[in-house]
Amino acid sequence: MEERKEWTLAEILEVHRKPLLELVYEAATVHRKHHNPNEVQISSLLSIKTGGCQEDCGYCPQAARYHTDIEENDLMSVEQVTTAANRAKVLGASRVCMGAAWRNVKDDEDFDQVIRLVQTVNSMDMEVCATLGMVTETQAKKLAEAGLYAYNHNLDTSEDYYKEVISTRGYEDRLETLSNVRKAKLTVCSGGIIGMGESVDDRCKMLLTLSQLNPQPESVPINALVAVDGTPMEDQEPVPIWDMVRMVATARIVMPKSTVRLSAGRLSMTKEGQALCFMAGAGSIFAGDKLLTTPNPATNEDLEMFEILGLQPTAPFAKGDRPQPEPLTEEERAKKENPKWSRPGHRIPAHVEYTRKGKLKKKAIQK
């Protein structure tokens, strides 16, 4: 068995700073050793509950405190999710990721509905992923028993810069959630966002933290910030494609067996730029007109790009057999939890100002 490398921050920074073509070549070599370079997984990201989130993530249009054009909607029905999953499957998707704008999972009727949604998509021979906020170990086990394949919970950025992005939850809660997901024997999907004002050191520190998880995440999404009007990060400059290529390539080298996911921000990338990301080790995209609430390339454009590049969609469960979760005990099945997730409570001036602006805009609309 290949020994797992223990990276240092200095080593990751050294990789990230290599001449770009040399970096891409090295990443492509690693990618071909562990993955089929002619396959890219098509995933569908579905917002099953949109808006109204009480968190203050500076990048997120679903935060209730800011005023954006996001329309809130209640939790989707089984019929709605079945229709969306069938449409995605016809277009080549092998994974459906369902996202709900929650701070954390609560043991209530909504969670019972999510369990039914997971069971429904799992029965369609598709990988099921969910991103629902923070979860306890028992909640993760309930999702696993229902057929969940992966749980997404991004670190977003480095622990140092995190306090500039979010004040309503702690970094340690992110790590605890990933630990709970592992204990439930689910695969882990965790990555971050670049372009939020962070430094290169912050980007590499995030990769270091992910690389230190044991085992390393099966999936590592690399997102480019999509600046949304009404959020504190609305004026951030777009991420250059070269930054995305460097992050994809560095993630590929640091976590060789993980699937690096080319996620948000593709709408501003050319096909040539995306091709370079695939060469550097990206093995997955999210298809569909939207990623939760932000624009995404049309599916027909992605299929055209696949044809040009000679790429094939990855089949479901190509990385291994379906998960076989252990049945819950009666005690676990009946367990209701009220975990005390942290609330750091520090003030981020831009968030305070945009919360004030959001309240004023809502009042003006109501009048």
Image: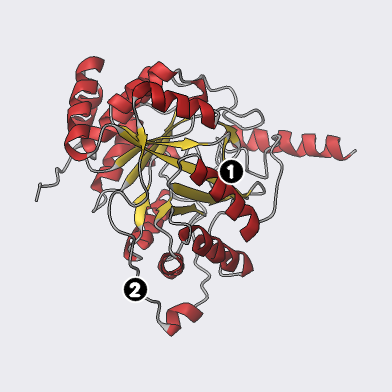
Q: Nearer the viewer, mark 1 or mark 2?
A: 2
| Image quadrant assignment for residue 211 | top left
Q: Name the disc covering residue 4, or none.
A: none
| Image quadrant assignment for residue 359 | top right
Residue where numbered disc 1 is placed = 56
Residue where numbered disc 2 is placed = 326
- Looking at the picture, the colour scheme in use is secondary structure
- Look at the image and tell me in which quarter the C terminus lies: top right
Residue 364 seen in the figure? yes
Q: Is residue 107 above or below residue 262?
A: below
Question: Quick check: marks 1 and 2 in contact, CB under 8 Å?
Answer: no
Q: Whole-percent x and y of residue 256? A: 22, 39
Depth order, front residue of 186/210: 186
Q: Residue at x 34, y 73 (%)?
A: 326
Query: In the rendered structure, which amino acid carries the disc numbered 1?
Result: Asp
Q: Residue at x 37, y 62 (%)?
A: 180
Q: Is residue 335 above or below residue 160?
A: below
Q: Whole-percent x and y of residue 226? A: 54, 29
Structural crowding at the residue carrying mark 2, measured as other residues with C-alpha within 10 Å and reported as few (<14), some (14–19) or many (≥20): few
Q: Whole-percent x and y of residue 126? A: 44, 53
Depth order, front residue of 78/188: 78
Structural crowding at the residue carrying mark 1, measured as other residues with C-alpha within 10 Å and reported as few (<14), some (14–19) or many (≥20): many
Q: In 3D space, how far apart are the residues under numbered discs 1 and 2 (Cα atoms)?
A: 36 Å
**Label whose residue precedes the other's in the sequence (1 or 2):** 1
